[in-house]
């Protein structure tokens, strides 16, 4: 897990480790393998956190687009990916790839501080 952007009693939002800005994970605190195993409160918490995360990434990084995916065949713990496609990303670069020649780099800790301000209720 990378730097934590925001957390409450049900959900944690963290940034992917490394210096590739704009790749967040929304996870439940409770260990559950899949979306259908979430409680209603967890599902609502995840939905709100992913929505705020997407809006925060758009505001702070001004990317071409913000995407989200729920996948996790390799890890038996629910997590939702929320990530940007930076302006200027070559068309041949896969939609979840972050490392390509010329890819933006940033101090992710500073970015997480800016992103966290968007989660204030």
Image (tube, rainbow, N blue to C red):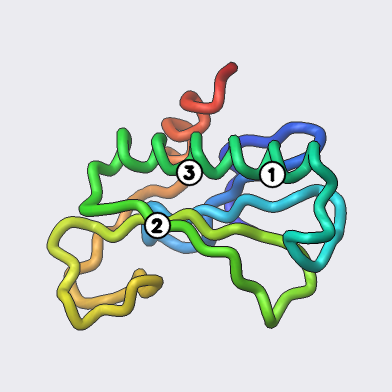
Distance from disc 1 to disc 3, alpha carbons, whole Å, reads 16 Å
Could you tell which of marks 1 and 3 lies nearer the N-terminus?
A: 1
Outermost residue toward the top in this view: 121
Tell me which residue sits at (20%, 82%) in the image: 92
Q: From the top left corner, tell me how far across and down residue 65 is, in percent.
A: 28, 53
Q: From the top left corner, tell me how far across and down residue 66 is, in percent.
A: 35, 52
Q: From the top left corner, tell me how far across and down residue 39 is, in percent.
A: 84, 46
Crowding around mark 3 (Cα neighbors within 10 Å: few <14, some 14 to 19, many 20+) is some
User: Circle 1 — which element?
Assistant: strand
User: Circle 3 — which element?
Assistant: helix
Judged by depth in the image, the label closer to the viewer, 1 or 2, is: 2
Tell me, yes or no, whether the two marked residues, 3 and 2, touch with CB atoms within 8 Å: no
Look at mark 3 in the image and give the residue it sits on. 109
Tell me which residue sits at (73%, 75%) in the image: 75
Look at mark 2 in the image and give the residue it sits on. 67
Tell me, yes or no, whether the two marked residues, 1 and 2, touch with CB atoms within 8 Å: no
Distance from disc 1 to disc 2, alpha carbons, whole Å, reads 18 Å
Tell me, yes or no, whether the two marked residues, 1 and 3, touch with CB atoms within 8 Å: no
Residue 12, disc = 1
Distance from disc 3 to disc 2, alpha carbons, whole Å, reads 21 Å
Q: From the top left corner, tell me how far across and down residue 100 is, in percent.
A: 26, 76
Residue 93, quarter of picture: bottom left
The N terminus, quarter of image? bottom right
Residue 91, quarter of picture: bottom left
Tell me which residue sits at (20%, 76%) in the image: 101
């Amino acid at each position: 897990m990378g730097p934590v952007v925001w957390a409450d009693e049900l959900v944690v939002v963290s940034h992917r480790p490394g210096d590739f800005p704009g790749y967040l994970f929304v996870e439940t605190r409770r260990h559950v393998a899949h979306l259908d195993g979430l409680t209603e409160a967890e599902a609502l918490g995840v939905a709100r956190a992913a929505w705020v995360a997407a809006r925060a990434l758009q505001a702070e990084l001004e990317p071409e687009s913000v995407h989200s995916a729920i996948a996790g065949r390799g890890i038996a713990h629910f997590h939702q990916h929320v990530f940007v496609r930076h302006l200027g990303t070559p068309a041949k670069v896969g939609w979840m790839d972050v490392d390509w020649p010329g890819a933006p780099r940033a101090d992710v800790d500073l970015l997480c501080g800016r992103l966290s301000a968007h989660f204030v209720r």
